[in-house]
Amino acid sequence: MIPIRDENPTRRVPFVNYALIVLNVLVFLWQVSLGPAGEVVLYRMALIPLEVTRGFDVGDLRSLLTSMFMHAGLLHLLGNMLYLWIFGDNVEDALGHARYLFFYLAGGAAASLTHVFLYPLSQVPTVGASGAIAATLGAYLLLFPHRRVVTLIPFGFFLQVARLPAVIVLGMWFLLELVQGTLALGMEQLGGVAFWAHIGGFVFGMLVGPRLRLRPRPVIFYGDWSRW
């Protein structure tokens, strides 16, 4: 299933979400502009579990942040930004701008630490905003479970457009990640998708996102003036 958009209008401009998308795109363009040297920079800014677990050096821990703004290719970037564009604005609307930024960065770090915990000896570089975006998806699932998501569903050579509740779209996404992550356990040296980073980020989003939701301001009534 490929989400196209959701039917969930926002009350405020999600400028933090816009800024995150722009920043990811700009960093990718910078990577491309470096030419062959871009691979060296990518490796230096990527998360490498062994470098984190062997000494807890501050420089290595910095990769928890830098890695979530790097991408391995154009399709990697576009897929991540599509999900962030569709679901991030509503989570920002629910949490508020500052809380959303904190939540996004903390979710990315939690996703990376999940990957490090399960693959502490891995030397395979890991990059991408997927973990932070997975946290956003987890929060969206609990905050807006019944909002409709316009989704492309492939049937062989044909595509069917359907309006599905977010609980189905995101629930199926998480289930697929869980199955693939379980099958990938013990194969940390093979590279590929960091499924458990996605899973860790998603669970973090479900646990933390709703707790950061802004509370509506109470309305105080001072009397019924219609009688005067």
Image (cartoon, grey):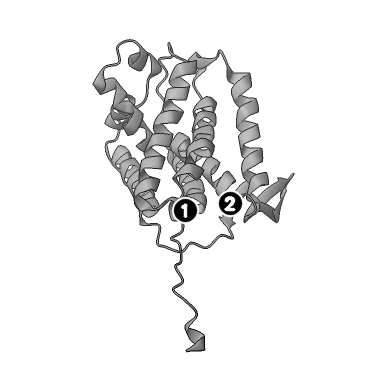
* Count of numbered marks: 2
* Residue 61: quadrant of the picture: top left
Q: Residues within 10 Å of mark 1 (few under 14, many from 20)?
A: many
Query: Residue 142: x, y in percent?
Result: 58, 45
Instruction: Specify the label residue 144 is tagged with.
Output: 2
Residue 190: image location, x then y, percent? 51, 17
Image: 48 above or below 204: above
Q: Residue at x 34, y 17 (%)?
A: 52
CA separation in Å, label 2 and label 1? 10 Å
Mark 2 and mark 1 in contact? Answer it, CB < 8 Å: yes
The secondary structure type at the circle numbered 1 is helix
- Circle 1 residue: 94
Kindly identify the residue that appears in the image at 40 percent across and 22 percent down: 125
Indicate the position of residue 225 as horizontal and vertical percent values: 47, 83
Front residue of this view, candidates 35 and 207: 207
Relative to 148, 55 lies left or right: left
Element type at mark 2: loop
